[in-house]
Amino acid sequence: MVLISHRSKGLKANLKSPQFSTYWHRSCTCANTIQIGKLKKTSTKSAIQGIIKGKKYFTVETIKRGLNKSRLKYNSTTVNQYLYNLKTEGELFDAGRGWYATVNASLELNTKPVEKLKSVVAKQFPLLKFAVWSTEQLQPFEHHMMTQFTSFIYTDIDAMKPVVECLKDNDYNVYLNPQQSEVAKYFEPTSATVVRQSVTEEPVEGYYATVEKILVDMFLEKDRLHLMDGAEYERIFRNLVLLHRINMPRLLRYADRRKVKASLIKDILAAEQDVITM
């Protein structure tokens, strides 16, 4: 009993000592720091998830603007780490440099509608660079089903006329770079093939246009050739990007090359701001 009493008194004495007081203060400070750190981490992650909730496509800048608006302190490394974690967990997917998407499925375009066209031109001009696409490739995303399709081939300016002659010899209803003012006079959209000059840095895979090129080209051709109205194009665009993941920077870069980036953003992307934020 005496020994226990002695130790008890020693413990009480230690509790009152300056050394124990310093140790206790440091321990509490460390524990509080850990708890605050966990709270901050949770708050940042929750804020990011709230910002991207319901969005199909968004940029890193979108997240940073949202965090700034919520007055939540953060650093770029932390944001990038959260995005990386969400990708690893299968909640986010890469949609091009600086862009993310919650749409998992990438798009594999059906090239069957233009395979014969590609083969005819490639056989006649084996060294020629060109790209083909058809409105028929967008048929799965249309609201009003098309019954008439138009195909396009983009190639070097010096090769345009020889390609037209080649296609005429193969019984194609082909047109050399028709403009909007000429369409009403002689353009017949039934199974038409249009030859246009290629655009530098246009996104293609072999001889086939990517979906990003098709969407930008179609944005122009819908008015030039009176293929469809703006509302139908917007429905096709929305149906496609909601079901399949596209490369947004590639789309915007090519739109910029074709000098329609501002119009595409204003008329289409801005109208889809419920699912796309830049």
Image: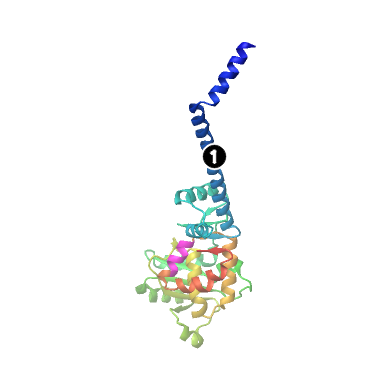
Q: Viewer-proximal residue, 67 or 182?
A: 67
Q: Is residue 88 visible?
A: no
Q: Going 48% across and 70% down the picture, which residue do you hit?
A: 216
Is the stretch drawn in magenta largely helix, strand or loop? helix
Q: Check the image and name the residue furthest to the left.
A: 158
Q: Is residue 176 magenta?
A: no
Q: Which residue is mark 1?
A: 32
Counting from the top left corner in percent of width and height, residue 133 is at: 50, 68
Quadrant housing the N terminus: top right
Q: Regarding mark 1 in the picture, which secondary structure is present there? A: helix
Counting from the top left corner in percent of width and height, residue 193 is at: 49, 75
Q: Is residue 34 visible?
A: yes
Q: Going 59% across and 62% down the picture, which residue do you hit?
A: 242
Counting from the top left corner in percent of width and height, residue 261 is at: 45, 71
Q: Check the image and name the residue furthest to the top.
A: 2
In the rendered image, the vertical position of residue 214 relative to residue 1, given as above or below: below
Span of residues in magenta: 248-255
Q: Viewer-proximal residue, 95 or 226?
A: 95
Quarter occupied by residue 109: bottom right
Alpha-carbon neighbours of circle 1 within 10 Å: few (<14), some, or many (≥20)? few
Counting from the top left corner in percent of width and height, residue 274 is at: 59, 65
